[in-house]
Amino acid sequence: MARRDRDEDLLMEDELTAAFLGDDEPTTKAPPAKQPEVEEQIEEEWDEEETVPGQLAVDVYETKEKLVVKARTAGVNKSELDVSIADNTLSIRGTLSAGNEDDVENYFVQECYWGEFSRSITLPVPVKEEEIEAVLKDGVLTISFTKLKQDTVKKIQVL
């Protein structure tokens, strides 16, 4: 039984490709030449320290009376949290401090995020901005809003 050479297989693939794509001649493609200046630029960008704050993960849900936003903020002190609301958008900002690590020579694994974080959330339902409660307990920030009642349908007259 005759054994095909790898080059013959590639030639066959090129002929099939040319037949289906309408090329007259089979072509073989060489791998693109490496571009050292591009690779160096990518490495430099990778090495640069990120300045973008991390994004805080949240849960947003509602009960019959309340809209609740929960965020895991373990390791953040109350004094390092900034929680505000404007135009029905909740903003949470803070800083996760890793503590003093001056004596660290080498990390073997570094998965924890340390540094500034933020999150802005457009609230999905209207709330009473003057009735907000924010509690930080056991590393969880819970913000509760009283929902505005909109049970009645308001008829709008078309002019």
Image: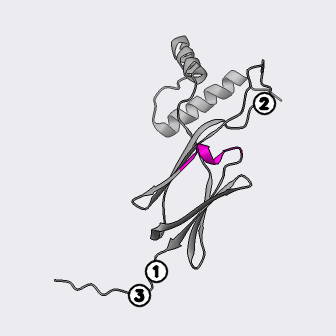
| Quarter containing the N terminus | top right
> Which amino acid type is shown beneath numbered disc 2?
Val
- Residue at image mark 3: 152
> Which amino acid type is shown beneath numbered disc 3?
Thr
User: Is residue 108 found inside the magenta-colored segment of the image?
Assistant: no
At which x and y percent is residue 34?
57, 14
For label 2, count other residues whose C-alpha is less than 10 Å away and answer few (under 14), some (14-19) or many (20+): few
Q: Is residue 137 left or right of residue 47?
A: right
Q: Is residue 33 left or right of residue 109?
A: left
The secondary element bearing badge 3 is classed as: loop
In the image, residue 64 above or below residue 48: below
In the image, residue 90 above or below residue 95: below
Q: Is residue 92 left or right of residue 138?
A: left
| Quarter containing the C terminus | bottom left
- Residue at image mark 1: 149
The secondary element bearing badge 1 is classed as: loop
User: Is residue 80 found inside the magenta-colored segment of the image?
Assistant: yes
> Which amino acid type is shown beneath numbered disc 1?
Lys
For label 1, count other residues whose C-alpha is less than 10 Å away and answer few (under 14), some (14-19) or many (20+): few
The picture quadrant where one finds residue 75 is top right
At which x and y percent is residue 128?
46, 70
Tell us which disc is closer to us: 2 or 3.
3
At which x and y percent is residue 39?
56, 17
What residue is rendered at 56% in x and 78% in y? 65
The secondary element bearing badge 2 is classed as: loop
Name the foreground residue: 58 vs 34. 58
Range of residues picked out in magenta: 75-82
Q: Residue furthest left?
A: 159
